[in-house]
Image: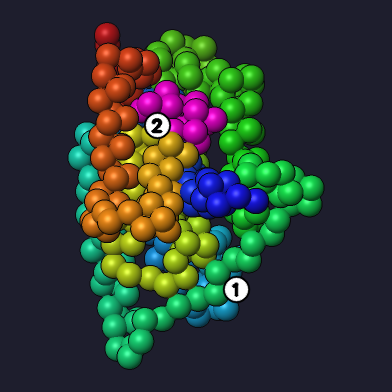
Amino acid sequence: MSKSLILLTSSLFAAVRMAVPLSYAGIGESVAQTSGVLNIGVEGMMLSGAFFSFFMTFYSGSVVLGILFGMLAGMVFGLLHAYISVTAKQNQTISGLAINFLVLGLTSFFFLVFFGDATSLPSIETLPVLPIPLLSRIPVIGPAFFSHDILTYILYLVMVLSTIYLKKTDYGTSLEAVGENPRAADTAGINVNKTRYLASMFNGLLCGLAGSYMMVVQFGFYIENLTAGRGYIALAAVTLGRRNPIAVFFVSLLIGMTEGLQFTLQSIGVPIPSQIFSMMPYLVAVIVLLLSIGRSNDPQTLGQPYDRMERE
């Protein structure tokens, strides 16, 4: 394999690793937004998943338990957001931001309590790479997409199943109806609050899984504010991907390519400061949002609480 193909393959491999947590969180948020619930607390739910998966894995020695615990933590905060926005009917943007700040404070506090006295940074074992036979041998595409860990392959499955759910099933149609016109959906016998609660919990579960992925695949150790704004990047991917799970993945992959570009340019000795590379994913996210101006297809009641007793 030529040097240029090796560089391309390594760049795509890094792009996929960057895209996986963004895609998990983006798919979860896509489902929630389709139901009419806007949750800017994606960052906080991802961070909770990262911390609690690390905590459980460190003390139990089981990566599987750690991942499940991280998913549960994200789901709990998704449920909290649902209570505030659906039952209490409070401002969803404020609720999401509050969750981000709350989780950042809680995880920093708990990390200090349980690991603050450690003489070295505590770490856990990461998931192994499991190349898929035959597919991983395809030039460039194989190593980039099919030489990863089990959570990456689960993402591919989640991406397909969630697309089928949203676009091809009656449940997906009901979810969309709740987001577009909850009063009409309620009249048709659809439980609006239940639908939004389930969508919010699913969002939290996938965001927790996104944080768990960052912990048990990308890092293997915990530092304060580990997610570092990736939840907001996932929100940008949802906006440009128009809540389509497959489109969200490819937008996340585009953003992830900036990280792959970092390794490529560094390997060929391009003298660019590392700070430039650090800011590139966020710069791309801003550009993505600028490109989405005027192209919004948001659900009609996105971010708006529903009160069946309120007259139109």
| Residue located at (71% from left, 49% from top) | 136
Q: Secondary structure at mark 1?
A: loop
Q: Residue furthest front?
A: 2
Range drawn in magenta: 239-251
Q: Is residue 114 left or right of residue 57?
A: left
Count residues near mark 2 (Cα–Cα under 10 Å), then give few for <14, some for 14-19, many for 20+. many
Of marks 2 and 1, which one's residue comes earlier in the chain?
A: 1
Q: Is residue 16 left or right of residue 223?
A: right
Residue 165 is drawn in which quadrant?
top right
- Magenta segment, principal secondary structure? helix
Distance between mark 2 and mark 1 Cα atoms: 32 Å
Instruction: Say if 306 sits above or below 111 in the image.
Output: above
Q: Per the image, is 246 magenta?
A: yes
Q: Which mark is residue 305?
A: none
Q: Is residue 182 left or right of residue 154?
A: left
Looking at the picture, tell me which residue is in the foreground, 308 or 254.
Answer: 254
- Image mark count: 2
User: x and y percent of residue 302 in the render?
Assistant: 33, 23
Residue 256 is drawn in which quadrant?
top left
Write down the residue under mark 1: 62
